[in-house]
Amino acid sequence: MSAIHLKNLTKSFGDFAALKTMDLEIADGEFMALLGPSGCGKSTTMNMIAGMEEPTSGKILFGERDMAGVPMGRRGVGFVFQNYAIFTHMSVRQNLAYGPRMRGAAKAEIDRRVCAIAEMLQLTPLLDRKADRLSVNILQRVAIGRSAIMEPAIFLLDEPLSNVDAAFRAVMRTELKQLQRQFRQTMVYVTHDQLEAMTMADRIAVMDHGVLQQVGTPLEVYNNPANVFVARFIGAPGMNLLRGRPAESDRGLVVDLGPLGVTPPLPDGLASTVRAMRGDVLYGFRPEQVTLAERGLSMRVSFVERIGARTIVHLGEGEGAVKAVFENDVGLSVGQTAVVAPPASSVRVFDATTGVSVKAG
Amino acid sequence: MSAVTATIAEGEMDARTKPAVPDEGARLGFRLTLPAQILVLFISAFPLLMQLYISVTDWSPLSGVGWWNAWEMWNSFANYTDLAADTRFWSALQRTAIVMLVCVPAEFLLGLALATLFADDFPGKRVFYSILLMPMMVVPAVAGYMFFMLFQSGGPVNDILARIIGTPVTIAWLSDPTLALIAVMIADIWQWTPLMFLILLAGLVGVPEDQMKAATLLGANPWQRFTTIVLPKMKTIIIIALAIRVIENFKIFDTLYIMTGGGPGVATETISVYIYKVTTQDLIWGYVAAIALAILIVLSIVAVYAMKRMAKAREVPA
């Protein structure tokens, strides 16, 4: 068992800074997801934790121990590759036994450990099958078992579900989460799929362009995005952000959105901080939280997406476009005008110049 | 409505005519490839049959009859019984085996070592790579002449040895029976290690990098990675490389013939040199045909065995 502490970690490849700076503490036994679009530095971070790449500067600590110069075979790290990297020329048994065998464990000891891990992962009937003819979920279990047999304190998973079709992904997610509960190891999970991160992780570290944007529990990240990037990236579709200028009205502080009119008044706490600011703000709210209202933003329906139970209504165009998600078909069609309003409590405000979230005072 | 009916009708037609299509395609294919097939028949089957025919006769180009009339000189299987008792043939075969047992493993090990080296990056890799492949591109006859010059008693090899040990060296490489054989083998290794290197390198870069990384993460040291991941993954390609070199090496001729002419005496006379001599000097073509056929059978057995092993390597987990 081991906590991971990344201190001022950076990584450059020539002129390209893959990781600009990273400070992150992952608690012992925690399931941490590194989430971000491709090229955000999440895999680089993972590879440095595993020891496949040397940091350009900064420190990686496992517990209290500095990992600088510790080769990857000696870090006590289990790594599950994107395509599992199963040894296809071996049987499942040989795959599972590989680690102990390389460390020179006794034959009886290897057999005992292989049997135990196979039992735990329900691989016992498949032990003598050749590894190149297995389905993905079994490959995933073999990959995890092969690492788990070494009893690593830390498990790293590099987008293990990206090769799996959508329907199967749900099954694998549940399975992975159960495995993590079983093994109780510290797990770091790299993904670009927010659904995976949201459903499995204890905490999510959202990254973009080599910079850590926000760390928090899935709900924290969803409800209180630290900045515009996180607001747009998390959620499907992402948060609606409308640019406007704070203005006083008889009902309280509102945001003047120009041609779209003015918003309902901001809640008191938020209003007091916004009053102290200068310049434009971004008025944000989740598409899922939009309701049809008597008073609010009156917008033209430009497109209606019906995805089974849910309906995504696209309102307005260009800069002022808003998406609204309804749980049932609300009967809107293209060309109609809808009056929508977010509940005051779900509104988030961001500084339009810095993109940083404005906290309620 | 009528459009719909038309489509259905077409669909039915398709369904009815479909089974006939591959058949027709196959017939057309056969007709189109017929000229090539006849050509293949003439360049492979015909010489083989002719050889088989001549091998049971005493026919020679000097015997005054066309080869098709060779049946007049039918000698029932005398050529084959002679072959079994021909000590020169058996010692040539033995010599060929020795050359093969030294050259092929040497080429394999050198090629594998070089391939392992070249699988990683190092400064000047491209230049060394080109230099390394050059011997393979030298015409074997030219290589033979080169090594003939190198191994002269006053040649560069002795010169270099003299410089190393500090006293003049006058080893008569090509006139000493043992040294001549060694010189010939060195030439073969020089020329054909690059091929082995090239094939093995192709196999080596095909070893999945993530599996190597996984092995490292599981604590395998470089040697363990090599024996448990690299070698098993390369099994098929290793068998191919060895089979190619075994078959080619068995036929070793041009370089060797120019260097020593099979001499001194018969000290470097391999199977090919022996056949060449019997063909051009003794002119007993019936006998030559018998030898060649015997060798063809031996090589075919080697090839079949190699292919069987290859198929097995693919099936059975290592």
Image (cartoon, coloured by chain):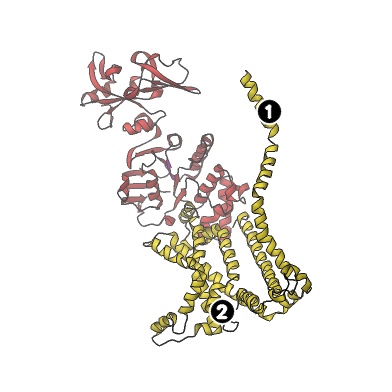
Chain of residue at mark 2: B
Q: Disc 1 marks which residue?
A: B12
Q: Which residues are magenta?
A: A184-191
Q: Secondary structure at mark 2?
A: loop
Q: Position of residue B255 (x, y in %)?
A: 53, 73
Q: Secondary structure at mark 1?
A: helix
Left or right: where does residue A217 sit relative to residue B89?
left
Can marks 1 and 2 be said to lie on one chain?
A: yes
Of residue B165 and residue A314, the one placed in the foreground of this image is B165
Q: Earlier in the sequence, mark 1 or mark 2?
A: 1
Q: Quadrant of residue A188?
A: top left
Label 2 Cα neighbours within 10 Å, binned few <14 / some 14-19 / many ≥20:
some
Q: Quadrant of residue A285?
A: top left
Query: Residue B278, relative to residue A289: is it above or below?
Result: below
Q: Position of residue B284 (x, y in %)?
A: 69, 76
Which chain wears yellow? B
Q: Disc 2 marks which residue?
A: B261
Of residue B1 and residue A317, the one placed in the foreground of this image is B1
Chain A: its colour in the image is: red
